[in-house]
Image: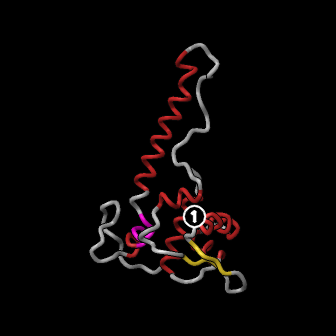
Amino acid sequence: MNSDFIVAVHALVYLNHKADIVSSEALAKNICTNAARVRKVMAPLKRAGFVTTREGNVGGYRFAGDASAVDLHMVADALNIRFVQSGWHSGDMDMKCLVASGMAGVMDDIFLDLDERCRERLAQISIADIDDRIFGSDGVVPFDGRPASSGAEG
């Protein structure tokens, strides 16, 4: 996984909370990254329909849709993110030893299973859940069971 997922979730929660058009520069300042990176991450979110854009001097991004209907699995899919994967494989498929020739495939299957389990959990967390966790909401239990924070500015 790379940090694009974190940038995307932060941006979507911020846009949902602001309920207005926010420039890439303002998003970048809140996320603590640069505006070019924000624009790169926001492009697939726009294609997925999670944000709309307006160009020009007062341009920027606006959250589109229902925050309770947009879950983190959907965000990961829009960004084509894998959470559990390996960039290296042990062994060699051409070796006669069954351990050496079979280990990469077995580990890939394990990583795919772990990634799917991660996505199943992310499907249970919406943008609205994160907003509630940050700002609190009467009667809402935070997604991890911990008490929600007080309604701080954001």
Above or below for 116 versus 77? above
Q: Is residue 152 magenta?
A: no
Q: Main secondary structure of the magenta part?
A: helix
Q: Residue at x 49, y 71 (%)?
A: 13
The residue lying toward the viewer, choosing from 29 and 86, is 86
Above or below for 149 versus 88? below
Q: Is residue 129 magenta?
A: yes
Report the residue that reaches farthest toward the right.
Answer: 56
> Residue 44: x, y in percent?
63, 63
Q: Which residue is mark 1?
A: 7
Q: What is the magenta range?
A: 126-131
Q: Circle 1 sits in a helix, a strand or a loop, which is it?
A: helix
The residue lying toward the viewer, choosing from 90 and 110, is 110
> Residue 86: x, y in percent?
57, 38
Above or below for 93 versus 140? above
Tell me the kind of residue under disc 1: Val
The residue lying toward the viewer, choosing from 130 and 72, is 72
Q: Residue at x 51, y 44 (%)?
A: 84
> Residue 45: x, y in percent?
59, 66
